Image: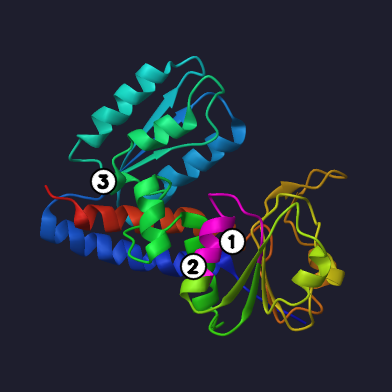
Amino acid sequence: MAKLIDGKAIAAEIRREIAAETEAFKQEKGYAPGLAVVIVGEDPASQVYVRNKHRGCAEVGFYSEGYELPAETTEQELLALIDKLNHDPKIHGILVQLPLPRHLDEEKVLLAIDPAKDVDAFHPTNVGKILIGNYDFLPCTPAGVMQLLARSDISVEGKECVVVGRSNIVGKPQALLLLEANGTVTVCHSRTKNLKEVCRRADILVAAIGKPEFFDASYVKEGAVVIDVGMNRRPADGKLCGDVDFASVEPIASAITPVPGGVGPMTITMLLQNTLTAARAAKQ
């Protein structure tokens, strides 16, 4: 029976630490770390994330601003808002909620954010710093996974780590962080041959492909640690589920993250950590 890695409990513990550090920061500096969240259009999932981000800011004592822009917002208008926030001393972190409406150039928008305020760590400057291991911020979900492992006393060093998924947001940075922690890392994707065999080598398996309950017990070595980054709706009943078939994998894994309540709560928590880091580094 696997040990359940409780993301809710670990996230709550980290948020208490951030709240205490924020209080000390405010006493010293006289102002709070500030986060601006920008959403364009009416994507329901994005709106839920944005509400959770504002709630998280309030919980740890941050200042926050929210900008809900209509779907027809022009690129020029969005870039002008980002420029204003780049120069606003009250704002230390800027987050533009993805996906954006199709008429907006996602790459151009992310490039417009000052790298020192890029608390999602999507700007090429920050991506490059992660690659050489000399970074200011880490992408929130992969950083959250590393905290889950560390705070569950799961060492990465010397372990066979398999990451399934190669997105810029999760898969690629996750592989880099596991490599930095001295894991031996394999990245798999839709073109990988013998996927099942590769996954069965893993001491630590990170599933991040966005396919409901794709990974059953046949993909998992007995005693492996299984980190489920997926967040899907089950086609049959619409319930939230991960990329891992929890019921079949949990009996053979040594540790596993549930969905919901595993990796999910960590993502916004690490965003708050990045914002505090940005505020500390800011030249006022």
Judging by the rendered image, the residue that carries numbered circle 1 is 263
SS of the residue under disc 2: helix
First reached walking from the N terminus: tag 2 or tag 1: 2
Name the side, left or right, on which 64 lies relative to 3.
left
Q: CA distance from mark 1 to mark 3?
A: 25 Å
Q: Which residue is mark 2?
A: 177
Is 173 one of the magenta-colored residues?
yes
Q: Give the CA distance from mark 2 to mark 1.
A: 16 Å
Question: Where does the magenta region start and end?
Answer: 163-178
Does the image show residue 59? no
Name the residue type under label 2.
Leu
Q: Nearer the viewer, mark 2 or mark 1?
A: 2
Mark toward the start of the polypeptide (1 vs 3): 3
Q: Is residue 249 left or right of residue 109?
A: right
Asked if marks 2 and 1 touch (Cβ < 8 Å), the reply is: no
- Residue that mark 3 sits on: 92
**Residue 42 location (% of width, % of height):** 56, 25
Inspect the image, locate mark 3, and give the three-letter code of the amino acid beneath it: His
Left or right: 4 in relation to 25: right
Few, some or many residues within 10 Å of mark 1 (<14, 14–19, 20+): many
